[in-house]
Image (cartoon, grey):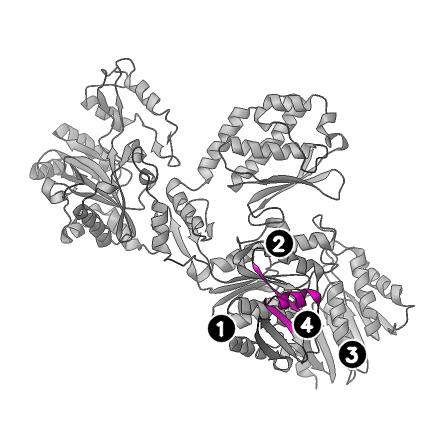
């Protein structure tokens, strides 16, 4: 068994709407049925009993590829990862399978696939496999990779409201929503929180001054410069005192309830290692954390310092080890509690209690290992949200707003939060930016609070799901023109529109990236853009197969057509039916309240209507086509051609757009452009764009090199008509022939090449389709042959012409071969006379169009 390639499908894909690892696996003939491998199944169950007995979904023999699938799945599940989808699919290539296994975190999914392969090889070789150790490593990797409890709770709350999200880093920086509706958080900080507010919160002395100005009770004290200065402050405010870093967090360097000069000197040294030291009056009572989200008190918890209780048998060290066995405790923040540490601070606390780590406390003796109660140092929390007095809640909210924090952890020390702070000499001792949320999400005792929901509700008002209109456009032909036209209509509606297509990425018509940008990375870039109000995303089959979609769902999905020659034979997609399954991924992932815009005349496209919960708008050149006619008779949305106009209907409602008002269609003469217009009109209608705006946008969109480069761009050169088009598959050729034959001309000249990464037959078919419509043909070879030998593409083109040369209607009298696209264009122009017509099938779009523009300008 050999894993040929492993890919991460990071969005909805051919097999599942979930994220998944895709491994291409090659099995030798004797590995196609594990029952034929002596002792393998028994050895596998010995090494990893949880894997059970792998089965094949088609009830055929179980190959090693199927075993790999089961192992990668169960390894993740045993490590605590909640996944369920897995599948093994045979390819047309003998012994080659595609293994698809869901993952939550990509690094964990990759590791699971690698360890599953190691398990299979160990079982084959009769060697050992450290199953428990591997599962532990996967669990540790998952804890490290996944969002922590604070950010995770917000992410889960966003998903529950249907708000899309994307991690921007492997840390806790997350974007919620798309485009102009996006918001971003990092841990428990939101994008609206200013750095000024964060700086204030870090400066404890400044924070105290501001809180005092707001009437919030705080302890007396100030920053100190030396141990002597610290002792002076202690005498001024009265013992006991607290020593802590002026700029600190998570309880680091904090010592409380200091009663002697020796204790203060030690506390000063501990705090000084983190920066400037503050000394404050120690407030008696309990340690409370009040969490403020926006303008509300979201939760409150009483925190207890890390401690153990003696049983008369175990040492302090042993008691700590016993407490740390609690599965809720870990070394990081991934769990609700943190392990207690016997560090220098804990040793100091033991010394104050006249104990050592090896002391055996009496039964019931409470041994405090820290005086601060932060969860990050091993403390515990009890929810007291429902007991907080309104006055205490008001003080916490005032403290957060005075500092300027949207999410704020307010630390209060008092006897109880059930009475005003002023009545019990309590006060706010600290205000924290980016507070930890886990004590409220999963308190040690008491009721958990839905903090994530509160944060999401603060970020997104009711009814706002953070989504902008997203339209996908896919198919064999017409994708780019439809995308450009629809983007033009959205901009006419006043929306800042992001667009991706095979020419680049555009924001409101301005190109920000060039090249083929029809994949998921480009889609994500548009959705990340903070100015984009709507997105039109051309989706190619390659990106879907390589990585899946770059988003979870769209509002509208357009499928223009499915045709032969669209990269068939690549990535194990051999038939148009399989190609339709790939492109249908866009339709299967539409919002239930959205629309699928489908070509009723293409059976493979029309059938996609049954694969989605969204509504369908069918379009057709033939108003009487059975699919469209049935749909229309049911009162559903339909777009079709009637006479010299495009008609849109729904029930009794009807709207008409004269083709004479749509320049791109050539008064209806260019049939494939009429289809593109119908698709764009239907999508715009689905998005709620008014009819008048659609008409205005259609009338101002021309098929020129600016609006639709490489899409039937027309030039006048030497009195002849020269059309440049990027058509590159049989269906495109058929559509072009229809237009060419309807265009009067004295002589017709064809300039053609072909992409080398197509199948031989696809290249031959192109010329055999075009041959009857032209008198002359110029074949050219471009610089990029895409894996072909020198002259191989032109030879295949010649074969296509020769195949039909004996058929009636064959007209080509002159054929010429040229090496280089621009030289071929020049050769064609030299042959043109006034009244002639020339079709140039361009490859390097920008260069070819610039070359033709120059000829059109300088030639009368």
Give yes or no for residue 843 being in the magenta stretch: no
Per the image, the residue denoted by label 2 is 611
Q: Is residue 191 visible?
A: no
Q: Quadrant of residue 322?
A: top left
Query: Which label's residue is closer to the chain start, 1 or 3?
Result: 1
**Neighbour tally class for label 2: few under 14, some 14-19, many 20 plus, Cα within 10 Å:** few
Q: Is mark 4 on a helix, strand or loop?
A: loop
Query: Which label's residue is closer to the chain start, 2 or 4?
Result: 2
Front-most of residues 70 and 378: 70
Residue interval drawn in magenta: 613-640
**Neighbour tally class for label 1: few under 14, some 14-19, many 20 plus, Cα within 10 Å:** some
Distance between the alpha carbons at the discs numbered 2 and 3: 53 Å
Q: Name, please, the residue furthest toward the top.
A: 313
Query: Which label's residue is closer to the chain start, 4 or 1?
Result: 1
- The residue positioned 52% from the left and 63% from the top of the image is 535
- The residue positioned 59% from the left and 50% from the top of the image is 548
- The residue positioned 16% from the left and 32% from the top of the image is 257
Image side of residue 32 versus residue 138, left or right? right
């Amino acid at each position: 068994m050999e894993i040929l390639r492993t890919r991460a499908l990071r969005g909805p894909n051919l097999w599942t709407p979930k994220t998944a690892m895709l491994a291409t696996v090659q099995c030798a003939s004797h590995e196609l049925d594990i029952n034929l491998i002596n002792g393998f199944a028994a050895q596998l169950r010995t090494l990893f009993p949880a894997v059970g007995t792998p089965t094949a979904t088609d009830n055929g023999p179980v190959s090693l590829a199927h075993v790999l699938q089961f192992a990668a799945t169960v390894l993740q599940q045993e490590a605590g990862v909640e996944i369920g989808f897995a599948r093994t699919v045979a390819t047309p290539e003998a012994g080659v399978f595609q293994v698809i296994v869901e993952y939550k975190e990509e690094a964990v999914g990759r590791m699971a696939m690698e360890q599953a392969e190691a398990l299979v090889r160990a079982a084959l070789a009769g060697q050992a496999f450290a199953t428990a150790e591997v599962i532990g490593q996967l669990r540790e990797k998952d804890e490290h990779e996944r969002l922590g409890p604070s950010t995770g709770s917000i992410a889960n709350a966003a998903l529950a409201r249907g708000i899309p999200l994307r991690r921007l880093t492997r840390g806790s920086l997350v974007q919620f929503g798309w485009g102009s509706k996006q918001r971003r958080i990092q841990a428990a900080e939101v994008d609206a929180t200013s750095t000024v507010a964060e700086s204030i919160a870090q400066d404890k002395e400044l924070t105290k001054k501001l809180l005092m100005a707001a009437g919030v009770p705080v302890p007396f004290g100030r920053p100190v410069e030396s141990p002597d200065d610290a002792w002076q402050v202690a005498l001024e405010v009265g013992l006991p005192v607290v020593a802590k870093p002026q700029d600190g967090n998570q309880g680091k360097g904090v010592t409380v309830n200091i009663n002697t000069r020796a204790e203060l000197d030690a506390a000063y040294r501990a705090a000084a290692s983190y920066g400037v030291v503050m000394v404050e009056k120690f407030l008696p009572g309990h340690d409370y954390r009040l969490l403020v989200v926006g303008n509300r008190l979201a939760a409150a918890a009483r925190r207890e310092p890390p401690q153990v209780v003696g049983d008369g048998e175990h040492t302090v060290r042993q008691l700590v080890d016993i407490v740390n066995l609690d599965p809720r405790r870990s070394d990081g923040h991934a769990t609700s509690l943190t392990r207690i540490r016997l560090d220098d601070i804990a040793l100091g606390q033991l010394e104050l209690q006249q104990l050592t780590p090896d002391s055996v406390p009496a039964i019931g003796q409470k041994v405090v290992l820290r005086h601060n109660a932060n969860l990050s140092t091993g403390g515990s929390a009890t929810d007291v949200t429902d007991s907080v007095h309104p006055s205490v809640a008001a003080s916490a909210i005032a403290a957060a707003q005075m500092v300027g924090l949207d999410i704020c952890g307010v630390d209060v020390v008092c006897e109880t939060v059930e009475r005003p702070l002023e009545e019990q000499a309590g006060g706010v001792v600290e205000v924290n930016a980016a507070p930890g949320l886990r004590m409220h999400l999963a308190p040690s005792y008491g009721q958990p609070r839905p903090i994530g929901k509160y944060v999401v509700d603060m970020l997104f008002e009711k009814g706002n799901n953070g989504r902008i209109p997203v339209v996908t456009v896919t198919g064999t032909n017409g994708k780019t023109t439809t995308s450009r036209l629809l983007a033009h209509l959205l901009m006419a509606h006043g929306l800042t529109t992001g667009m991706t297509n095979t020419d680049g990425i555009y924001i409101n018509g301005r190109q920000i990236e060039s090249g083929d940008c029809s994949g998921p990375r480009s889609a994500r870039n548009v959705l990340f853009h903070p100015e984009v109000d709507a997105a039109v995303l051309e989706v190619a089959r390659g990106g879907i197969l390589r990585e899946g979609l770059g988003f979870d769902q769209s509002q509208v999905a357009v499928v223009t057509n499915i045709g032969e020659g669209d990269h068939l034979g690549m990535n194990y997609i051999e038939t148009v039916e399989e190609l339709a399954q790939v492109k249908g991924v866009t339709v299967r992932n539409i919002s239930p309240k959205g629309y699928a815009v489908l070509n009723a005349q293409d059976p493979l496209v029309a059938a996609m209507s049954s694969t989605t919960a969204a509504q369908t708008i069918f379009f057709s050149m033939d108003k009487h086509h059975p699919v469209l006619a049935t749909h229309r008779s049911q009162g559903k949305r339909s777009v079709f051609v009637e006479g010299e106009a495009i008609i849109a209907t729904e029930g009794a409602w009807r709207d008409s757009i004269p083709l004479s008002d749509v320049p791109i269609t050539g008064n209806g003469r260019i049939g494939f452009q009429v289809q593109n217009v119908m698709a764009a009109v239907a999508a715009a209608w689905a998005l709620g764009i008014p009819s008048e705006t659609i008409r205005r946008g259609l009338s101002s969109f021309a098929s020129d090199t600016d609006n639709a480069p490489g899409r039937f761009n027309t030039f006048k050169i030497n009195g002849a008509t020269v059309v440049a088009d990027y058509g590159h598959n049989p269906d495109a050729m058929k559509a072009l022939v229809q237009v060419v034959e309807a265009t009067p001309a004295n002589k017709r000249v064809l300039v053609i090449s072909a992409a080398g990464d197509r199948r031989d037959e696809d290249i031959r078919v192109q010329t055999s389709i075009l041959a009857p419509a032209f008198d002359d043909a110029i074949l050219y070879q471009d610089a990029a042959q895409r894996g072909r030998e020198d002259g191989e593409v032109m030879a295949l083109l010649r074969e296509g012409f020769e195949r039909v040369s004996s058929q009636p209607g064959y007209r080509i009298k002159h054929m010429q071969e040229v090496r280089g696209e621009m030289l071929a264009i020049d050769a064609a122009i030299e042959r043109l006379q006034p009244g002639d017509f020339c079709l140039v099938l361009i490859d390097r779009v920008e260069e070819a169009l610039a070359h033709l523009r120059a000829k059109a300008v300088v030639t009368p």
